[in-house]
Amino acid sequence: MEQTKKQNATSPDDEPSEVERLKEELRREHEMYLRALADFDNYRKRVERERATAARKGTREIILSLLPVLDGFDRALEHLGDKPSPMTEGLFAIHRKLMGLLEAQGVTPFDSVGETFNPELHEAIGSVQSDAHESGEITDEVQRGYRWGDEVLRPARVRVAE
């Protein structure tokens, strides 16, 4: 009977191995927890980046669709007479409002006439023989170019001196 008690009782040698096994299991579980936490943080950051990219892309598309409207206003305002009228003043007010809206989004026009042709900023649609301008200098801007922050939103369409 004493021998049976000895066999049923846990030996002191078995106890430390059980503690070590539990410690090892706890360590593995903790590592899995930390890995899951890091994976979730990476997922959150990726989703945030994708959302920001999608929002910027949507804003860009809307802005690009407004530029032809602004071009129409620019052409109309060029052909108005010097005589002020309520309609002329209204067109100028709408133009200013539209420009203000775009500038609030960080969209700014850039001037090209007199500048040296730069393929990153300009799209050449023709060349002009000119003694008054150096070769490669922009003589005429057919369509204004715009930046959105540091990005060229739309290059200017220009004629370049030969």
Image (spheres, rainbow, N blue to C red):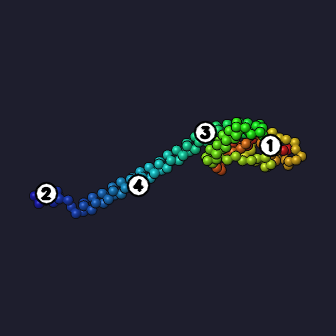
Front-lying residue, 78 or 34 = 78
Look at discs 3 and 4 and give the one toward the viewer.
3
Which quarter of the rendered picture does the C terminus lie within?
Answer: top right
Compute the Cα span from label 1 to label 4. 62 Å
Quarter of the image holding residue 4? Answer: bottom left
Look at discs 3 and 2 and give the one toward the viewer.
3
Instruction: Mark 2 and mark 4 in contact? Answer it, CB < 8 Å.
Output: no
Q: Percent x, y for residue 97? A: 64, 43
Q: Secondary structure at mark 2?
A: helix
Look at discs 1 and 4 and give the one toward the viewer.
1
Q: Secondary structure at mark 3?
A: helix
- Amino acid at pointer 2: Thr
Which tag, 2 or 4, sits closer to the chain's start? 2
Question: Which mark, residue 34?
Answer: 4
Which tag, 1 or 4, sits closer to the chain's start? 4
Instruction: Mark 3 and mark 1 in contact? Answer it, CB < 8 Å.
Output: no
Crowdedness near tag 1: few (<14), some (14–19) or many (≥20) residues, C-alpha within 10 Å: some
On the rendered structure, is 17 left or right of 53?
Answer: left
Question: Which mark, residue 140?
Answer: 1
Crowdedness near tag 2: few (<14), some (14–19) or many (≥20) residues, C-alpha within 10 Å: few
- Amino acid at pointer 3: Ile
Which quarter of the rendered picture does the N terminus lie within?
Answer: bottom left
Look at 22% across and 63% down and name the residue there: 12
